[in-house]
Image: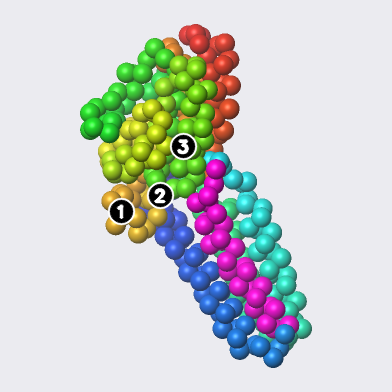
Amino acid sequence: MSTTKPLWQRRIKRWSIVTLLAVDAAAVTAAVVGIVTAAPNLPARLAWVAAGVAGLALPVQLAAFLRLRRGRTGRNLPVMSAAAVIAVVVAVLGGVVGKTPWPALAAVLAWATTQAYARWYTRLDRVGQDALEVGNPMPEFEVVDLDGSVVRSLDFLGRPVVMVFIRGNWCPLCVAQVRELAGQYRALADRGVQVMLISPQPLDETRALADRFGVPFRYLQDPGAQAAQQLGLRHEGGVPPGLSVLGYQPDTVFPTVIVADAHGRIVFSDQTDDYRLRPEPATFLAALDTPASWRRT
């Protein structure tokens, strides 16, 4: 098992994103109605506008992820959080002057969704795997390539290798992480580095990812997240509800980066505790450039 949380807690967390967005939708709907009905009462109308802004803070942040060029964000999403706080203050003040408490209530509930997302939902309830830490031998596992042929991790011995476990194309931060790697392709190739991009997502999605970036990485599928299970990286219930219509299974993999030198010894390992926080390519390139990473120690 790669998580210590009981099943019922994992189910709550999986479905909580739906609940958070439903609360935001309710806040925005209430704001629209309030703006219309409070037309003669300008302070109340301003308060409802602020409540609407608070309700949009999280959805806009999620939409902004689709345009990310980097595979990471600030830990507590300060822009989103600040926008929601300011909106709450305006909603409270406008409500006091306009003699209505409802905009403040809607704004506070919407603010709570931003904090639940930034400080709880994106945190990964994972247990770090000691076998994947620096200094250990590269783990042995099997996955399949785009043709469905079996690929073994030990097939990559003899050259440095970067193993990136991604949740799937549905995750904008995963796609941004691959984009960053693709942008560093020349730097990786000059070092003779092989890149393995591993995901339990449907093979067609992995093919689409390969076509999207067009760099000669090894795009690999982990059917049924079996390799992830073996390595302690399986994220049970990690796929948001609704994606099953696209062929995704409920379980995925914890975002993880493992870098091994030409001798098969791990020289860099990132087992992030938040799927929004991932290492920059420069970090593990530096690990590969360290002299100790090119020889058995």
Q: Horizontal and vertical percent for residue 96?
A: 75, 82
Q: State which tag comes first along the sequence, 2 or 1.
A: 2
Q: Distance of mark 2 from mark 1, alpha carbons?
A: 10 Å
Q: Which residue is drawn at 52% across and 35% down?
A: 180
Q: Name the residue under label 3.
A: 178
Query: Is residue 88 shown to the viewer in this render?
Result: yes
The residue labelled by disc 2 is 170
Q: Residue at x 39, y 34 (%)?
A: 214
Pointer 1: what residue? 246
- Looking at this view, is 212 or 42 the one in front? 212
Any magenta on residue 50? yes
Q: Does residue 136 sit above or below 129 in this rendering?
A: above
Residue stretch in magenta: 43-69
Q: Are marks 3 and 1 in contact (CB under 8 Å)?
A: no
Label 2, label 3: how many angstroms apart (C-alpha)? Answer: 13 Å
Please report the residue visible at 71 percent of the width from the left and 88 percent of the height from the top.
Answer: 41
